[in-house]
Image: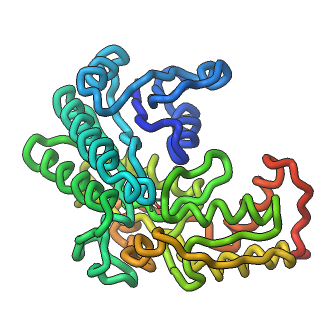
Amino acid sequence: MTNILVTGSRGQIGTELIELLRSIYGREQVFASDITQVSVEERERGPYVYLDVLDSQGFAKTVVDYDIDWIVHNASILSATGERNPELALKVNARGTENAFDVAKRYNLRILSPSSIAAFGPSTPSVDTPDVTIMRPNTMYGVTKVWVELLGEYYHQRFGLDFRSLRYPGIISYKALPGGGTTDYAVEIFYEALKNGKYTSFLRPDSRLPMMYMPDCLKGTVDLLRAEESILEQRVFNLGAFNFTPSELASEIQRHLPDFTIEYQPDYRQDIADGWPNSLDDSQARRQWGWEPSYDLTSMTAEMLEKLAEILNVTYKSAIVV
Ligand code: AKB
């Protein structure tokens, strides 16, 4: 039996990852943890633990109390919130990860601690960015993600820690909202398209970024988490799927909702996006552990509109006749 602890479990990815891990490893084996209150219904879905990742004693106690084998360390302050409050991002992302690595080393646990396209920066080659390249990010979030990668690799070489990491692109999903990221526009646009028929983008129309639909993100995460250690030739992998600009996403939505309109009012998040790659080379993930995304811009958009319309309880009929 494998007991898994997920930090930041109430975030956009954690919310859905918990459900998937419980379906594979069992309801009682997967411990959700975060610092917020949860409803009775959420508690009934499986164990939930209060865990502030800055509390190293609390972290160790949780691992011992629940006999944890693997940690998925998702707790993190994202790019846009991180630029508004760099001190908080430094504390949560760097010290929280240091605590996670320390406890994983002490109790000999496997740890998956995600990174992001934010680990790259303006001097990184932006097209088909490879795994190993120039990494000089200009956001606090990016700086802390490079720290996660380097510290994890150091703990792996020096202490044999089974550390794994994925550089996530922007993740698009309909179950839980993303919180405080630069790629959040690609989720918000669907809510606004269905509710109000219009959206004001905080990025320019031509701002191209790598993106991924949640089912692929979950598949990649679980596949790397479960991969035999012997097949991994490196510890950190780019994870790509597709890429688009706000204007391309708007055009795809307009195929379903022809009256949808978009305006552009770039703000401080444009500077963040300008430092990130346009597309990723994820050939190593594909070759070493069989990564392969299933969704593209067309299939993701069609499904997002369908599913979100149900959740929002709005009348929706795609203009595309099949
Ligand atoms: C963000 O926009 O900050 C995140 C990310 C790309 O890591 N979604």
When the figure is inspected, residue 232 is found, relative to residue 183, above or below; the finding is above
Q: In which quarter of the image is residue 70?
A: top left
**Left or right, 160 with reference to 53:** left
Judging depth in this view, the residue of 27 and 203 nearest the camera is 203
Residue 36 appears anywhere in the view: yes
Q: The N terminus appears in which quarter of the rendering?
A: top left
Using the image as rendered, state which of residue 127 and residue 221 is in the foreground. Answer: 127
Q: How is the image coloured?
A: rainbow
User: What is the x, y in percent for residue 319?
Assistant: 89, 74
Q: In which quarter of the image is the C terminus?
A: bottom right
**252 on left or right of 136:** right
Instruction: Classify the position of ligand 1 by quadrant: top left, top right, bottom left or bottom right.
Output: bottom left
- Which residue is found at the position 69% from the left and 73% from the top? 298
Q: Which residue lies furthest to the left in this view?
A: 158
Percent position of residue 320, x then y: 87, 75
Residue at image coords 63%, 60%: 187
Q: Which of 188 and 318 is in front in this view?
A: 188
Tally of numbered tags: 0
Q: Which residue is drawn at 61% across and 49% down?
A: 177
Please tell me which residue lies in front, 132 or 311: 311
